[in-house]
Image: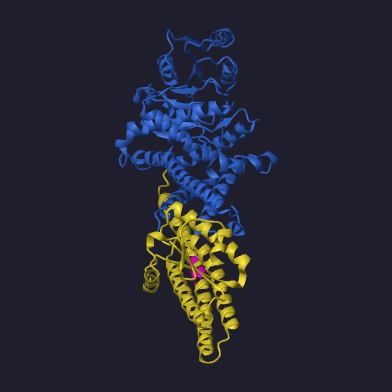
Chain colours: A blue, B yellow
Amino acid sequence: MELLPYVYLAYMFISIYMLTFFLMLYLKNAKTLFDYPSPKKEYTVSFIVPAYNEEDSIKEAIEHIFAIDYDAITQVIIVNDCSTDKTKEIVSSLLKKYPKLTLINNKKNLGNAAAAQNVGLRYATGELIAVVDADSFPHKDSLKKMVGFFDDEKVGAVTCPILARNKTKLWEKLQAIEYIAISFGRKLLEYVDAIYVTPGPLALYRKKALEDIRGFDEKNLTQDIEATWHLAYNNWDRKMSLATGVHSKVPHKLKAWFIQRRRWNIGGLQCIQKYWKVIGKKGMLGFFIIPFFILNLFLGLVGLTIFFYLLTTRFINSFLLTRYSIIAQTPLVTLDNFYITPSVLNYLGIILFLFGLIYLLIIMAVLKERIFKTENMFTIPFYLIFYLVLYPFIMVNALWNFARGKYVWR
Amino acid sequence: MGQKQVFWQALLITILIFSIGVTAGVVLENWRTSKIASLYDLSELSLLDVKLQTEIYSLGEFNCEQAIQENIAFADRVYEEAKMLERYEGASRLTAQIEQEHKKYDLLRTMILLNSIKIKQGCPNRYYEIVYLYQYNDPSLETKAKQSVFSKLLIELKETKGDQILLIPVAADNNLASVNLLLEKYNIEKKDVPLILINRNKKITTLTTVDELRKYLE
């Protein structure tokens, strides 16, 4: 027997396992997904917003932060990392309106969000630190539904769903589906203590926990993933409040999307490089988070390799067949070519696709996305068949850049 | 709040789903194999019948027309069954039994050839006997493409010449002693395969057109 069917079967097994795992977590916890504890005390909160050329969104982001229904917001610190647009002027013009707003202008460009966040951290006085991206807009009820988790002293960070702000173009709609799928999965991972990222658009940290991990890793392109792993390493729990959220602008052009995703992948690879020795140790970090992360990054690569192998052999075969058919003056296509005899692997592929579809429909139904909206009838299959297939290509590019040590933010 | 048991539960469910899937796959492939096997049984029966007819004819006045028609019609039927076998083989991923069926069909087709040889002794030059020897085990992409074109050529030739052609495709590399003997008898080496053997004397190894093939028959 050939090797390829077994590789394919192993690939299927892992994929079906992951989907079953998430579906089971959902079924076991469906009633508590949106639960959040009411805080026993009012924690003071400092916001840190790193900003580089954010003139389009910074004003609205600040307004959203100050509109949050929570009395103990003590500071909103904007760290302007030498923007060359009007970010500085816009924030300056709001200082009078919002007395708790602080603007820090870096003397030189630090080149990444982590460094700017660390600058803000030095000025932050709150018991909790809320990190917000300058193009993100937290929901009004976000803090009320997140801070209660900190009553448990082991909790170091709390995250919430990141939702797409702009979803008019197809590319944005696809990302919107992806964002809710990721958020839903992150909530489910909370039940097994396996939250692996507290994303930048809105993450709430206990200041003591951030000090414990010595702030954000400035060398890492995904400082939010690294910080989460570091917290897990230092035995801090991470929680997720599905009851609220933050809207964030998603790239509307393919190139910007590609660059963003490549950065995520390179950052992920940096994290793996930094923590690979922890595999098999340190509780869920070493036993699940890192292996799960590696699997997520590389499973697509295996699929891509198989796909290219099949595509190449099919192409060579077609080329030779055409060449020989021309020599022999025989028809290129005959009726026999249209006979399809599916193999068991084809059937398993269909089962896997249906599993994925069911999981996605559950997510959309739970998060009250209108599944049967005409546009979703097209975007959901497109997302499953085409969008997810693009990931391995980004991974290949990320690996290439990672191997060359090219860790660039933009 | 830990729910670590989900890891094991999901594993068990996955093993269950996967086992059902793989078992269903094995059942499907076995069903296809048994379908081929039952067709083979019928063909084997028909072969015995055709062979006996040939024997009976050879006792008295030989009815060439009928013997030839019976043999060619039978070979055509086996050819159609072999196409189904080929499709099932292409979709077979978990079991190898169908390869045994292929070998049985190779032997069956070799027997058709032997029957044809016997018929030709009594009725020479009444039809063309075309044996197509091909590589079955791991052909290279180039050989695969070449064999595919050879098959198309022979089908086209068969369509135009109809009952004048007895077409017998046989895998040359299935390690069947009788097929190996046949190759030896007609001085065919395995490296020459794919090869078309016309009337047991003309060998064609290079791709050609149907018109050229027709010329070989004239």
Residue with the most extreme right position: A374
- For the point 50% across and 10% down, the residue is A103
Residue A85 falls in which quadrant of the image? top right
Q: Is residue B30 magenta?
A: yes
Q: Nearer the viewer, residue A72 or B138?
A: B138
Give the position of the N terminus of chain A as an image quadrant: bottom left
Q: Is residue A143 visible?
A: no
Q: Is residue A251 above or below residue B45?
A: above
Q: Is residue A69 above or below residue A268?
A: above
Point 51% across, 46% down: residue? A315
Apparent side of residue B37 relative to residue A115 in the rendered image (left or right):
right
Q: Quadrant of residue A215?
A: top left
Q: Which residues are magenta?
A: B29-33
Q: Is residue A35 above or below residue B142?
A: above
Residue drawn at (60%, 81%), measured in percent from left and top?
B65
Indicate yes or no whether the magenta region holds residue A206: no
Q: Position of residue A245 (x, y in %)?
A: 56, 31
| Count of numbered circles in the view | 0
Residue furthest out toward the front: B218
- Position of residue A326 measured from the top left corner of the image (x, y, whole percent): 56, 50
Compare residues B59 and A340 and report the one nearer the observer. B59
The residue shown at (49%, 54%) is B145
Whether residue A387 sits left or right of residue A268 in the image: it is right
Q: Is residue A72 visible?
A: yes
Whole-percent x and y of residue A22? Answer: 49, 46
**Overall secondary structure of the magenta section:** helix
Residue A377 drawn at (x, y percent): 66, 43
From what the image shows, is residue B50 above or below residue A145? Answer: below
